[in-house]
Image (tube, rainbow, N blue to C red):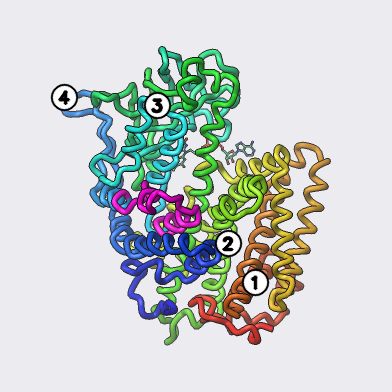
Amino acid sequence: MLPDYATYDEAMGLDWYAVDPNLRFTLDRLLPENADRAIAEELVGEYGPLVGGPIARRAEVTDKNGPVLERWDHWGREADRVVHNDTWLENKADLVRHNYTSLHARAGNRPVPGVVTAAINYLVCQAETALICAMGMTNGATDIVQRYAPDAVRADIVGRLTSTDPDVAWEGGMFLTERQGGSDVGANTTKAVQDGDEWRLYGEKFFCSNIDADVFIVLARPDGAPEGARGLGTFIVPRQLPDGSTNGFHMRRLKPKLGTVGVPTGEVVLEGALAWLAGGSSQSATGDAARDGRGINRMMEMVNGSRFGVAVMGLGIHRRSFLEAAIYAAHREQWGQRIDRYPLVRETLVDLLVELEAGMAVTFECAAAVRGSADEEEARLLRRILIPLAKMRATRAAVGAASSALEVLGGNGYMNDWPMARQYRDAQCHPIWEGTENIICLDVRRAMKGEGAHEALLARIERSLDTAGPHEPLARPADAVASALKDAREAIAYLASADDDLQLLQARRLANLLADVSEGAVLLDEAAWALERHGDARKALVARRFARQHLETLPVRGIVDDDRTVLDFFDPLIRYGKVDTAAVA
Ligand SMILES: Cc1cc2nc3c(=O)[nH]c(=O)nc-3n(C[C@H](O)[C@H](O)[C@H](O)COP(=O)(O)OP(=O)(O)OC[C@H]3O[C@@H](n4cnc5c(N)ncnc54)[C@H](O)[C@@H]3O)c2cc1C
């Protein structure tokens, strides 16, 4: 059944999977094996009503009742306790109970496709991205502990991090950033001193989200290691010692944040905190992994995973923004008719959705590339460059989407007793977190210069053009993608021999060009798939609209052509209805 926004009182209380046919479309396309698709239906289907219902409602309460640090107890002893509203704790407990940190076990210990975990995160992020900050880092920490913790503690910590019992479940966090800088982590001064097979950490960490988690992945410099990022090591640090005493870990304060209020972000002082070097017991005895520069790689594995997670946060906010705006516009009347009858409102809603579908196409492609590709190295390189591009694009687009959607709600949108104000505040966290947009653009450049990752991307885009070739409705957007691909090749060749400062100056422009052409290309794949499978030209319209907005140069700013897509196809576009191929010829 197609979503009918006029029949919903509000977004909260709906099954957010059921009202999102594009999510089902994405799962259908990227999970061709029946067993994978069945797992997706079971798990993602379970999250739809959970996040749209209780989790979304509690998130609104948490936003108005953020965490408070009890630094000292009434005897004047250091307590370092974060007091949360019950709504935050209940939301995390719900995720734990619904296998958010143990999907693998829920799926009968068979691997859960990345597309499925991405879909679950996408749904949760529509309710509260702060929740994924906390619980997503827990999954990242589990991965590091599983691979690199000493044998003696590994099973116990992993068992707790993946428990489905909220009373015993542990959470994770990651501390890189220090007061002198988050982009240049090579300037980190937190020191690690070897103590037998273990280490002791001394220093300050300045942005510590999920500060009252139980185990942290921390960057520090072993004594005697070289300056810069190469000399950093990755350490696993429990917050408390087995006897329940604090592990040389002091919370200085919680940050007064603009948004993502639920998750406590604070400043931490480490004074001799016991730590294990991520790298196995043989390396922990010598510290070689840190001293020869391999140490930071462990952390970067976690950071790449988190950057993908942050891209999904952007998508979640974008989708929630669209849903809120579509429902409001179907109810609100001005001059005697629903505001979604007005052409400018129609255009806003359609473009919110087109941008979202473009972002989803590329972000979910990152998740699918790991499993689906025939050539593992190509999949790795594709992921290497597409993740930063997806993070840059989805998080920036979400800020714009939240702003546009808020305005569809008029003055109500600006009020904290309507849902858009929080989404707008939360959205601004994600372009910064896990690397600002500039740093992400530089990371794209590093992936190109160091690993030639763009070759995998350009080849992938060529394949999309081949796929689109036979489909007449895709002729125009395919031409636009081909022309942008030519531009991208020219830009890459030009910058390869340009002065270094010019290369740096153009890094954002190049990343945006690559993001545009990637989104345009994957939309062609989706559109071709829908035409072949279902004879449905709706995605072709999305691909055309995206190409028009991002890839084509229109005369007189597009004012003098007679493109009526947002007027004539408004209903099937925003309600995901089938469009006849003949209608778009
Ligand atoms: C809500 C929130 C939660 C956070 N949680 C955590 C956490 O749990 N753990 C953690 O480790 N960190 C966390 N962070 C920190 C975050 O990762 C950093 O804020 C971010 O990486 C930027 O670092 P910075 O704030 O030191 O800014 P800076 O590095 O000082 O950057 C300032 C500006 O300079 C620009 N800039 C810097 N270098 C360059 C360059 N070479 N070229 C071009 N521009 C440049 C940046 O793009 C930015 O615009 C959190 C941040 C926020 C806002």
Query: The C terminus is located in which quarter?
Result: bottom right
User: Which residue is painted at 64% across and 70% down in the image?
Assistant: 543
Element assignment for label 2: helix
Query: Which of these two is toward me, 11 or 231?
Result: 231
Determine whether label 2 and label 4 are within 8 Å by CB.
no
User: Which of the two labelled residues, at mark 3 and mark 4, occupies the earlier sequence position?
Assistant: 4
Element assignment for label 3: helix
CA gap, disc 1 and disc 4: 68 Å
For the residues carrying marks 3 and 4, which lies nearer the camera in this image?
3
Label 1 is placed on what type of residue? Ala
Can residue 410 be spotted in the picture? no
Rendering coords of residue 278 (x, y %):
47, 27
Q: Which residues are magenta?
A: 96-125
Q: Is mark 1 within 8 Å of ligand 1?
A: no
Element assignment for label 4: loop
> According to the image, label 1 marks what residue?
528
